[in-house]
Amino acid sequence: MSKHMRPRGAGLLLLAGLLGSVAAGYDYVTPATGIDHTGGVILVLVSCMLLLLAALGILAMGQGLLAGILTVLIFLDIVGTGTAAWFLESELVMAAMMIATVGFFYWITSRRMAQ
Amino acid sequence: MKKRPFIFAATALIGAALLLPVRGIAGDEDWSDFNGNAKAQKYSTAAQITPDNVKTLAVAWSVHTGDLSEGGTGIGPKTAWQSTPLFVNNMVYFSTPFYRIFAVAPDTGKVKWVYAAKTISNDPKSKFHGRNRGIAYWAAANPIAGQPCQKILYIGTVEGHLHAIDADTGQLCQSFGDHGILNVDQWNTINHKFPFELNQSVSIYKDTIIIGWAGVDWTWEDSPPGSVFGVDARTGQKKWEFQTEPENMRSKIGTTNVWAAMSVDVQNGLVYLPVSSPENNFWGGNRKQEMPYATSVTALHAETGEVAWARQLVHHDIWDIDTNAAPTLVDIQKDGKQIPALVQTTKQGFVFVLNRLTGEPIYPLEERPVPKSDVPGELAALTQPVPTVMQPTTPWNFPGLSTIADIASGGQCSRDYASYRDEGKFTPPSLKGTVTETPTTGGMEWGGGAVDPTTQTYVVNSSNVIQIYKLIPRHEFEALYAKVGAAAGATEYESPYAAQISSFLNLWGMPCWKPPYGTLSSYDLKTGKLLWRHPFGQVQQWGFYMPESWGSVTIGGPAITKTGLIFIGASMDSRVRAIDLKSGDVLWKHQVDAPAVSTPAVYTYRGKEYVVFAAGGNGILSPRIGDQLVAFALPN
């Protein structure tokens, strides 16, 4: 596996999880967003934090069964969070999930290349 | 000598400049009434904001009053702020759910003064706490220089007190009532189950103010019977009183009151009353006698209180579908004639267009046969009046089950539906539960519609809500009430039947009926033709916005401007919008703190046009409430 690619893909996922968490936190406390203090934003905040943790997980584990499971869960997290952000009309979280999508495919590609 | 014209001109210019900050300039457009003007047209001739530039509209100023309560045990219900500001006397005036009047600068929102009405609603434990819909303004035709109270603001309170405030100073007018406060509740002499609650702005006809009242519905059959008062604008002395119920009914049947704003035809000396339904709201076995003013629009001679004409819009109302909005007065051109018209919207989604001098329909009405009641003792009306030309805003029959809600609840919606009675609009409440199309929540609510009098285009927002009306025999209800308390439903004491009124939702709280849940419609009053109808607003649940095609339930009305724009809040999603009058397309929207459940005000001050919304919310629509008054204008 080309060691310089894996961290970059996972790094983008990490960044997306971080940005998404910050964006969801902002949405939660800012009345002008129209979604402040709602259950939907809490859901997205939690899912972004989970993305952050999962990205840390694959970064630490690299290959293996557990990393494979985490990869699948990351995919589901991105799809779910992106959909929720769409219905929340949270552009910031949607942007974070776009970064996550790029990072995810980067990660998958680098993983395949390594195999 | 030759310099004199220059000196005069310079002096005049300087004088004008000095006066500008306090007097505004010629061409400023007022919004002097809760509904824009006495005719309840909600129309402004302001022309600066147009369909071409509205997308650049931005917040000009914003005021947070601090007058809000989230409610809870021991602190009363949530506040519901539904006040439309006034722009008059070169000042923006508005009232809050804590019964305070703010006077703010029209261009900056800077608070000039605040009047705080002393009222039981200031006690946070008061059960009547926290509802207000606005204030009224009166100005003397021939003001006496140096005398106070030549311009008066009126604010009502929950205990039936009407406060008269000097619009210039914010001080009570000592010559009005008892040192500035008129106790309207002194005239609440039959079945004093609750005080006359003065939520709505009073109406003004010359030097007479006309006062209706709200109360506590669904609770006592023998509550205070409906009445309207005409009092002297300067002194508060009663000039006349109008009773909405036959004399022999008044001791046993309550409400039939006028709780919404009224409209006034100053030229013809008439005031128009949207009269509500009587108690018991859902079973009329104790009121089979004719009550011609119940659920009607009634015209009174404003000087005397005598009836000019009345038209009942629902016979023997057993759905609590009060006439609830000030009718809009407009002259329409039809068949080569100018007709003085009145447009009355209703909770069942009907638009009645009547001749406002006679009450006769301009577009035909049909007395349509409707289902009979199967409840012992009840005698539902055999027919109901239905407009035949003006297309209703809500469907006559159940719009169909929501597939998503039905699947999500494992078929709960379809099972429940099969267990209820449903024969379309006006199916009477029943013991097994009736699917009620356009129930008490509307259809059209108290915001009513707006009209462009130049084109005679009428615009109104409407909700499509389905509720289940279930009557419960008294002994069963008492047992239920002992177990669950107020959750048992509408008590309707002294009546053989109480009632449970609930929205038709599945276990997840999803509506069991198909969207749209709210629409905005435009009619050509010259022909009665529907010009367009679109879903309006967005439902928001847990922060998630549902598709625009679903629309939103709405509370609060629209305003129209000369340039062909509709401004409206009203929706659940806490957004305010500008809409193209011709097409119904949304041209601009902006997030505010809470649903703007009131009609916006539009005015021009010193040449600049402002659109102002009270983003106060209402627990019926959404949990989100606010205390924000926000003005929008074009950037400099």
Image (tube, coloured by chain):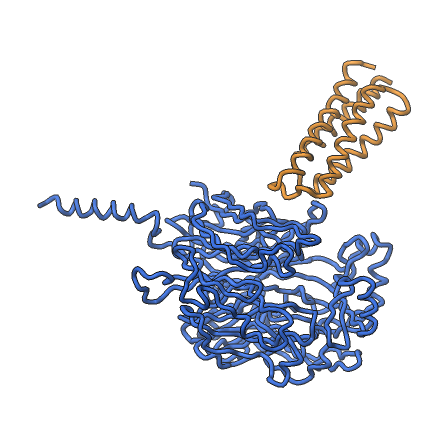
Chain colours: A orange, B blue
Give the percent coordinates (x, y) of residue B295. 62, 75
* Residue B391 appears in the rendering: no
Looking at the picture, how far across and down is residue B424, in whole percent?
74, 71
Give above or below for B110 relative to B152: above
Residue B200 x/y as whole percent: 54, 64
Q: Quadrant of residue B471?
A: bottom right
Q: Residue furthest front?
A: B179
**Count of marks, rendered view:** 0
Q: Nearer the viewer, residue B120 or A84?
A: B120
Name the residue: 75% across, 36% down.
A81
Residue found 77% across the figure and 36% down from its top: A79
User: Where does residue B60 sit, x and y in percent of width and height?
Assistant: 47, 44
User: In this rendering, is residue B331 above or below A56?
Assistant: below
Front residue of B380/B276: it is B276
Q: Quadrant of the C terminus of chain B?
A: top left
Task: Specify the quadrant that holds the N terminus of chain B.
Answer: top left
Direction from residue B121 to residue B175 in the image, left or right: left
B60 sits left or right of A92 in the view: left
Residue that appears at 81% across and 62% down: B484
Asked whether residue B16 is in view, the answer is yes
Outermost residue, right side: A65
Please tell me whether residue A48 is drawn above or below residue B240 in the rendered image.
Answer: above
Side (left or right) of B467 relative to B616: right
Query: Which of the 4 quarters of the picture holds residue A98?
Result: top right
